[in-house]
Amino acid sequence: MMPVASPSRLRRVATLGAAVLFAVTLQGCATRQNPDPIESWNRQVFAFNESLDANVLRPVATGYNQVTPEPVRNSVRNVFNNIRDVWSTVNLFLQGRFRDGTVSVMRVTINTTLGLGGLVDWATPMRLDRPNEDFGQTLGVWGVKPGAYIVWPVLGPSTLRDSVSIPGDLYFSASTFGETEAVTFGLVGLQLVSVRAGLLGATGLLDDVALDKYAFTRDAYLQRRQNLIYEGNPPEDDEPADDPEGAAPAPEAASASADGSASAPAPGPAPSAPAKP
């Protein structure tokens, strides 16, 4: 059973929700011809995230991989993924995908009970695949356009539509178990390092192939989000307008919210977050 959220954590989520609502007022700024109307600001935040990643997150994640046995790393990742699966399940039902939602309920139930709170992922070998849904995808299924591309500090790439999902992504994350501020920040930090450790290989690939890392990450993120919303088959008129001809497929490292986000969220600087797979 999920513990009741503490008042302090609810206040943090409410504050972030207010920031998201303020950002949504920029929705009209984005057009098909210019999905990135605040590119100058986004590039500054992207540079901050890259610096934070290079100087803090990547070294810590590398050390985490070196000193933590693989079974322990897998168990930590499984627990965080199991919490996120609850949020994915909610969104499957909101999207009207009742069969997939039922399968996801079975997955969460098995991993929470037989898997000792998610430490062991028994559901995947049973072919109960992990969902990858958030409220941003749900809004996309409902017909809401993505709006302007935006890069959030630490959380990484998003859109105005996907930003509405951030409070839910954070609620169904490691912070769920935090009874005090110190415990909450410690768990969130552990989740961030765990996600970042899983992306170390993808980071090298992104550094090698991208001449303009910001533009590559943006285009890959927008393309991937469309593919998720339309389950891999987006209509041609909904494809990102500025997607360059022959652009490389979207790597996992470019998703914000890293799964276990980006969808996240996924959180973390590019290649990100939380989150919002």
Image (tube, rainbow, N blue to C red):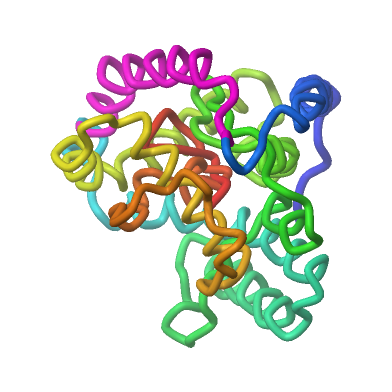
User: Viewed as shown, does residue 122 lie left or right of 94?
Assistant: left
Q: Quadrant of residue 142?
A: bottom right
Q: Nearer the viewer, residue 225 or 148?
A: 148
Give the magenta range.
34-62
User: Viewed as shown, does residue 132 lie left or right of 63?
Assistant: right
Coordinates of residue 274 in the picture (x, y in percent): 54, 40
On the question of residue 177 being in view, the answer is no
Q: Nearer the viewer, residue 236 or 202?
A: 236
Residue at image coords 57%, 47%: 276
Coordinates of residue 82 in the picture (x, y in percent): 57, 60
Coordinates of residue 81 in the picture (x, y in percent): 53, 56
Q: Quadrant of residue 108?
A: bottom right
Residue at image coords 64%, 33%: 148
Residue 60 counted in the magenta span: yes
Q: Nearer the viewer, residue 110 or 93?
A: 93
On the question of residue 153 being in view, the answer is yes
Which residue reaches farthest front? 33
